[in-house]
Image (tube, helix red, strand yellow):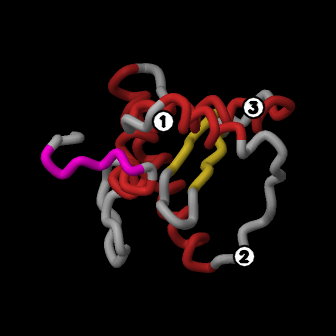
Amino acid sequence: MRFVLFVNVKTLLTIFIHLTPKEDLLLRFQQALFKELLRLGIPSDETTEEALRYQDFSLEKNTDRSMAGYMNQMAFEYKIFLQMHLEEHGTFEPEVAQELTNRSPHVKREHDFPDHHVRELFGVDDPNKPFH
């Protein structure tokens, strides 16, 4: 099993999808982003608009050393999570690992939780309404 890890530099929101088939990788990324933003409570019209922004983009090599370190850490954690999940359930759901990552705090960041940061950017973060 091979997976692709997409991480937003600003929010650290993580999208995790199967690598194959490679031909529709960007389309599957858009679909996964749409689904994750909906899970975070982002209104569907804004979610659609955001996902469509990635219709014509290309993948590039990461040159940010801090982000490379973060992505290496996430790849390691996903590998461990994958092993544990396969042993326990016999299958692996990338969406489960993705949700756990986006709900996990990150140290030395202005916003500790990626999911809270994304909700705040979209203006749907209500401090009186528990999210988790």
Residue at 78% over, 40% down: 55
Position in image of residue 6 (x %, y %): 62, 50
The secondary structure type at the circle numbered 2 is loop
The secondary structure type at the circle numbered 1 is helix
Q: Earlier in the sequence, mark 2 or mark 3?
A: 3
Position in image of residue 79 (x %, y %): 49, 47
Q: Main secondary structure of the magenta part?
A: loop
Residue span colored magenta: 123-128
Q: Which residue is mark 3?
A: 27
Which corner quadrant holds the C terminus?
top left
Amino acid at pointer 1: Glu
Was residue 72 drawn as part of the magenta stretch in this picture? no
Disc 1 residue crowd, few under 14, some 14–19, many 20+, Cα 10 Å? many
Q: Nearer the viewer, residue 100 or 113?
A: 113
The Cα atoms of the two marked residues, 2 and 1, are separated by: 26 Å
The Cα atoms of the two marked residues, 1 and 3, are separated by: 14 Å
Amino acid at pointer 2: Thr
